[in-house]
Each structure stands twice: as C-alpha cells, then as structure tokens.
Amino acid sequence: MTVTIIQARHGTLAYCSSAVTWDTAALIDDETFTGNINEVKNLTVTLPEQSVEQVPCLGATAQTVGANARTAGTATGIIAATFQNAALDMKSFTNYKFAGTLIFTGDEQFAHVLGLDAGTAWKTATAHRYAIGNLSSGAWAKTLTGALRIYLNNGSEKASVGMSNVIITKMGDIKPTGADGHWEMDFECECLPKDGAIEYLD
C-alpha cells in the first residue's frame, strides 16, 4: 500500500489584508491573496472542536442488539441489564486557529499588517512606529477583514484551510533561537467557525 505524505516544503501560507470574495466557482487555493509568507515555520492549524456533556436523566431503558444498539440491555438472569437514560448536550464549536513562528526579518510582516494599526511615520518617514492596545485609534483601525490560507500540495494530493475575518490574538515572544541563531517571533490568530473551511482534492 502506498502512503502519501505532505512535507513542510509542500505547504504555502498566504495572507490578504482585505476581505476575500469567496465563491463556488473557485477553490480556496485559487482565490486571490495579497502575497505568500515564506518566513514561517512550526505552523499549527487547529480546526474547531466540539465538546459534549452527559446529562443524566431519570429512569432506565432496556435494549436489544440491533437497531443501532451494540449491546443487549436485558439479561436472562434475575437482574435485568438496563441503562440509565441520558442525553448528550453538545457545546458550541471553538474557533479556527493558526499558530506559528515567524523568522524575524526586521520589517513589517503579515502579522504586523493584520495585527496592528497603520502606524505613525517617524523621523521624516524613515520608520514607522506602532502601538498595541491603543483604544483611541489603534484598536479600531486594526484590520478585521483580513484572511489567511494554508495550501498543501505534494503534486498528487491537495488540501487547503481558509480563514477570513481573522484576528491576530498574539504577537510576541521575540527571541533568538540560540547564541548563533536567528531571531524569531511567535504569532497566533483565530476566526469564527463560520469564517473558516477545510477543503480536500477529490
């Protein structure tokens, strides 16, 4: 049996600083994005998860094998083998999440574009200075309609995860990998379940 694997080099992360017009005529990886992000590693894609809670109810019910039951709920002995009535309470789904590490290049990267305000030109526009958590302007000027896409293609199989209305929830932990290594920065972002999708090649 042949096992297909997709390696790190087969993945491409792309971002868009404005809303993407999703439609049924194009695949997720065919939509137009601002650009690819090459300086990223350790990317983790977390799909929405749902938890359930058992709700014990009064009474008990006997069952027989079949009709979607795998065990018998009655016994031939003196004590009948029944099951307490119960239901599963399904909780809300969690968000789509992207988390990873950017190679720190000393220039604005996609996390800065999506996670910060427009910044202020400083010293005759030779640099831009940004604030984090500025409620007077920065929080409201932050991009809230941007999108991210991870595209996996090993030449035979393809898969994509698309997220729109992405919010950067973490930009931080700027650190070197070692005494002789490069500097890097962790990032995390999320979107609602309705704003994400995963797509596989048939």
Image: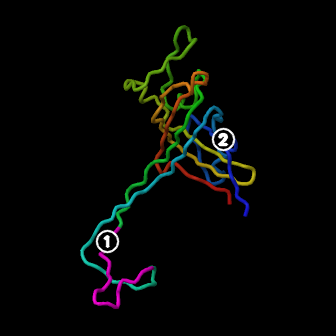
Residue that sits furthest to the left in the current view = 58
Q: Does 140 appear above or below 63?
A: above
Residue 174 appears in the picture as rendered: yes
Along the viewing direction, whichever of 137 and 60 lies nearer the viewer: 60
Q: Does 53 appear above or below 121?
A: below
Image quadrant occupied by the C terminus: bottom right
Q: Where does residue 106 sit, x and y in percent of width and height?
A: 59, 21
Q: Amino acid at mark 2?
A: Thr
What range is drawn magenta here?
A: 69-87
Residue shown at 43% from the left, 54% from the top: 93
Residue shown at 70% from the left, 48% from the top: 153
In this image, 86 relative to 24: left or right?
A: left
In this image, 198 relative to 140: left or right?
A: right
The mark nearer the N terminus, 2 or 1, is 2
Q: Does 90 appear above or below 9?
A: below
Which secondary structure type mostly characterizes the magenta part of the structure? loop
Along the viewing direction, whichever of 139 and 79 lies nearer the viewer: 79
Residue 69 appears in the picture as rendered: no
CA distance for labels 2 and 1: 46 Å
Q: Amino acid at mark 1?
A: Ala
Task: Find residue 86 and name its label.
Answer: 1
Residue 13 within the segment the image draws in magenta:
no
Q: Secondary structure at mark 1?
A: strand
Image quadrant occupied by the N terminus: bottom right
In this image, 48 relative to 22: left or right?
A: left
Which residue bears the numbered disc 2? 12
